[in-house]
Image (cartoon, rainbow, N blue to C red):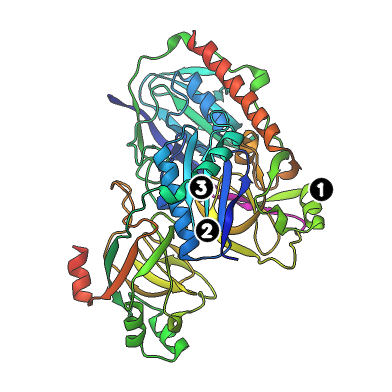
Amino acid sequence: MERIEAFEVLEPGMLTTIQDSGRYGFSQFGVPPSGALDNFSFRVANLLAGNQEGEACLETTIMGLKLKALNEMVIAITGGDLSPTLNGEHLDMWRVHLLVEGDIIAFKRARSGCRAYLAVSGGFAVPKIMGSRSTNLSSRFGGLEGRALRRGDILKRFDCPSPLKRLGFRFPSDGIPLFEKEVVLRVTSGPQDHHFTEKGSQTFYSSSYQVTPQCDRMGVRLEGPKIARRSDVEESIISEGLISGAVQVPGNGKPIIILNELVTGGYTKIATVISTDLPKVAQLKPGDHVHFESISIKEAHRLLGEQEELLRSFKHFIEGR
Amino acid sequence: MGLYPKAIFRFMGDRGLLIEFGDEISHEVNEKVRRMALAIQAEAIEGILETVPTYRSLLIIYNPLILSIDHLKKRMQQIEEGLQQTPFPEPKLRRIPVVYGGSYGPDLDFVAEYHRISSEEVIRLHCSKPYFIYMIGFIPGFPYMGELPEALVTPRLKTPRLLVPVGSVAIAKSQTGIYPMESPGGWQIIGRTPIRLFDPEREPPALFQMGNLVQFFPISEEEFEIWSE
């Protein structure tokens, strides 16, 4: 497929990387999935821009990204509200826009959430490494040369007919997630809930935990009441596989929510955030507060099915236009 | 207790099924993990996204919208029951060259002093037997191998290093490993290998797989330079 220039990076912002739906099938070699952290916003951005839902997008964090359009193209921005502007004017998120050569997109500050997704029609053109275009920052491969964007980078996209019929089209407002500063995260218990005392478990489910500045694509470290462990079990366990959403409790008793860049770990996990609520974890910022609420696996699967149905009907609707 | 008579299933959220085969690090338990992982891969079950084999468990990451948890558990039980019949590859042995000590292995002298033996004896012991790869993890391509000779069992560093050079050969407790890329790390570094363990563009990307064997042999700095080219 032909590649054409899409953007020049005027400012890279706090952290901007290229991410797609993730890298699967390589964990036996110690390779984590990476990929867009807020999978829901990411998929909607792609659908709006006329792509398959898993194409490579930009994931930008908190503030500062500034891009110059080098060609005409269709884009959409979703995720956390980082106050995007077009040539200095407010730009609607969750909506299809046409950019022309010379247009400037800038993200001013985080009004809500932490990460925004910018999809461009055709998708960002970087090589597939182990089946994915996602950036693995710690091992330095994938995405754009395995690194975050830098000033002066030229981003290319795959050429495709612009979906002009869709201009101005919006994602239904009742489907747009709200990213608040106080968040309830639904979890299913385990796999090592039996390592904690009843009181420890009560502490976990009844307390408010605050997001610390140690909050990145690896995980979100929380501050709050210490979760008591049973006295007859060890603090660490034999290393085992990890999944995003796993809530690890290390020796200090303060929980850490694991995200997309780890493949194994040796800490006990009291609970695991349900898939439907992972976008809320991706949008947490230092200072936000988190409560955990326990639900059953069956209920978690029902909620995931509901979310999938929302996306499916939107996809059906937009592809008909 | 060792190997459980029957695997224990634990949920890791709504997309993860953790299958635990035992409660210790042993060849017996690890072999069952590997047998199970190979049998599952061979079946190519629709809806399984990933299998993560580790010391004593296997994490299955699945899409619950394609594969129901009840069905997945049942299939896993069936596969476990039929495990003895599945063919099992012989372990491959790979010999890995290492420059020991000096700037390549800054903790070699500490390890020698800790055990009150000479550095030469540490090198001789480290090269004295093949090591079994229990799992690949922590960072891409990092092999967790064991067991070290009793006389080399050494605690981790009190304070982890912020940056361990690529190729560093290290020990911690009864295990030995190799850092496939620059990384923070808390193991005692005794040498370095010029062999490239991980290359994202290679197929497969990692040199090692769990279940294989590694034996180290000492080389000089000059040989290291030649190997590196």
Q: Which mark is in front, 3 or 2?
A: 3
Mark 1: which amino acid? Answer: Ser
Q: Give the residue at mark 1.
A: A206
Q: Position of residue B52 (x, y in %)?
A: 48, 49
The numbered disc on residue B56 is 2
Q: Nearer the viewer, residue A232 or A99?
A: A232
- Residue A124 within the magenta-colored segment of the rendering: no
- Measured in 3D between alpha carbons, the distance from the residue under mark 3 to the one under mark 2, in whole angstroms, is 14 Å
The numbered disc on residue B171 is none
Q: Is residue A220 visible?
A: yes
Mark 2 lies on a secondary structure that is: loop
- Residue A219 within the magenta-colored segment of the rendering: yes
The numbered disc on residue B80 is 3
Mark 3: which amino acid? Answer: Glu
Q: Position of residue A82 (x, y in %)?
A: 59, 33
| Residue A63, image quadrant | top right
Give, as a single range, the part of the protein colored magenta: A213-226
- Measured in 3D between alpha carbons, the distance from the residue under mark 1 to the one under mark 2, in whole angstroms, is 33 Å
